Image: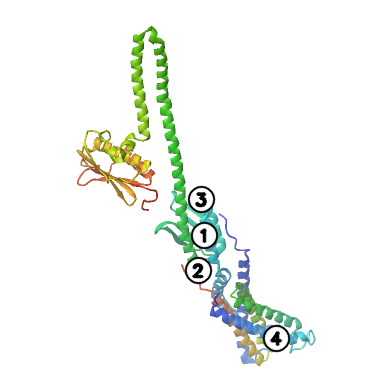
Amino acid sequence: MRRISLRWDANTWISSILLVLLLTTYMVVIYVVVVLVGTLPFGGLYNDFPSVLFRVPRWLDLISFVLIGITLIPFRRWLRARIHNLVYAQDDVPYVLASRVTKQLQTMTNPQRTLPGLMEMIAQTLYLPYVAMETTLSNPIRHYSYGAPPAGVKVNQYAITYLDTPIGELLVSARTANQALPANYITILKDIAQQLGIALRAAQLTAELQASHERLVIAREEERRRIRNDLHDGLAPTLSSLQLQLGAVRNLISRDPEQAEALINGLREDMHSATAEIRQLVYDLRPPMLDELGLVGAMQSSKFQGSEIRVEVHAPDPLPKLSAAVEVAVYRIASEALHNVIKHAQATTCQIHLEVDGGCLVLKVIDDGISLPPNIQTGIGISSMKERAAELGGTLTVQPGEPSGTCVFARIPLESGCMEV
Amino acid sequence: MTHSRSVTVAAILLFVYNLYDAVQTIPLLAQGTANDSSLNKPPFAVSLLVFTLAIFGVFAAYGLWRNAKWGKVLGLVVTALNILYTLIPLLVAPLFIKLVAAGFIILNILIVVLLLRSESAPVNV
């Protein structure tokens, strides 16, 4: 950590010279006044200066030295504080600092690069030996600092908050142990702490957005790779095999028609399984029923519901136009929730409710079976439902139903930015 | 720009005192080094120093009036030096001169107090 060296600073020289000059003047005035008062009853002193100083009685010297000795230290303390304020506290410094801090924070995208320089700038503008900040937005807690507090000097703390939530602290020390910060410095430091809160939160959101973009790209590329592998490892060999068998059929059809016919029957089965494989691939990309029947129709179809329990779908008519991403997410969440009900809930009925509330699509899947145990560990199914909702900026919770059973509650914004903060 | 009352009063006092000082040393400077050994006349070098100090004092008063930091620093330096050289007649001059010198010293001490008093007191956090 770098330390501010105040020793060779111009302001330090000015305050030292002023202190020495005024202390010297004080001591000389005390001495002269004591000598004057002491010699007045005896007619005073009327000789040339400086020879007159050698004629001053020694007891007067002693009295003046004692008086100076008693009063010098308190006077020096008072004088030093005033001179420090005169030399270091300027009226326009807080405004200059606020302007510089605002400029730096406006362009801050990476706090780890910007904040150390910001601490240095605050310290040098206010002539402070130590300025630091801690932020709890990241894990572990990050600490940025400039300089070090002098020994015995109290470090003042100013809370950094965002929407009334503490997210860090600004730490500042005074210059010396017996000197506190001027009132205008304290005001500007509190304002800077508020600005830091907003800037840190903005930087965190930017970082999260970037990470989210990267996850999206990774997920897209993973999906493409999965499809490529499915096609390459599954469908392509099947089609190649069909091609070879067709070649064999052509060769056999004139020489051995019966064997050719058997081969053709085998080919039909292979074609059937290849078609099923293609259908599954297509289904994994997007369920065809969504395009054919719409979201509500797809949920009401027998293929979605199965035959194990009775499923009721309640939705507004007409349902607002939904984006493809929202449709697929809601469909998959409802499908997974229904699958869990059938597998675990021992229910007889399951109700699926769709509502539009405040720019969000609300999905509730409620069953009348047994409730979830209180401390159940989240499995892959619930995790994947939550991820699907979170990908679109939504939320998903699993809570006990009334009077029994379980309720899966998902809230997904119809447009980005509609979710409450 | 706002003047604190202390700084305003200090600027006026500093201006008046140093203007008087400058004006009263002009005749002494005009005499040059003649009669430098006379007891009734300070040496030419001292008169020149006092005159120079008085000019700086006038500039400091201007700086104080503009509420500039340099004005306060220069004002304190000039006033401290004024006190130091005014102590000599206070010590050795006849009674009447002693009284005048005492008055001037009190005036300069008042200026110093006004300048230092104008700074905001430290705040305990």
- In space, the residues marked 1 and 3 are separated at their CA atoms by 15 Å
Crowd around label 1: few <14 · some 14–19 · many ≥20 (10 Å):
some
Q: Amino acid at mark 2?
A: Asn
Q: Mark on residue A110?
A: 3
Q: Amino acid at mark 3?
A: Asn
Q: Chain of mark 1?
A: A
Q: Estimate the spatial distance between the alpha carbons at disc 3 and disc 4, rounded to whole Å.
A: 64 Å
Q: Chain of mark 4?
A: B
The residue beneath circle 1 is A102
Q: Are marks 2 and 4 in contact (CB under 8 Å)?
A: no
Please say if the residues under marks 1 and 3 sit with CB atoms less than 8 Å apart: no
The picture quadrant where one finds residue A80 is bottom right
The residue that disc 4 covers is B23
In this view, the residue in front, A270 or B62, is A270
Local secondary structure at mark 2: helix
Q: Are marks 2 and 4 on the same chain?
A: no
Is A256 rendered above or below residue A208?
above
User: Relative to B71, is A414 on the left or the right?
Assistant: left
- Residue A297, x across and y down, in percent: 28, 38
* Residue position marked by numbered label 2 in the rendering: A184
Disc 3 packing (10 Å; few <14; some 14–19; many ≥20): few
| Residue closer to the observer: A105 or A310 | A310
Discs 3/4, front = 3
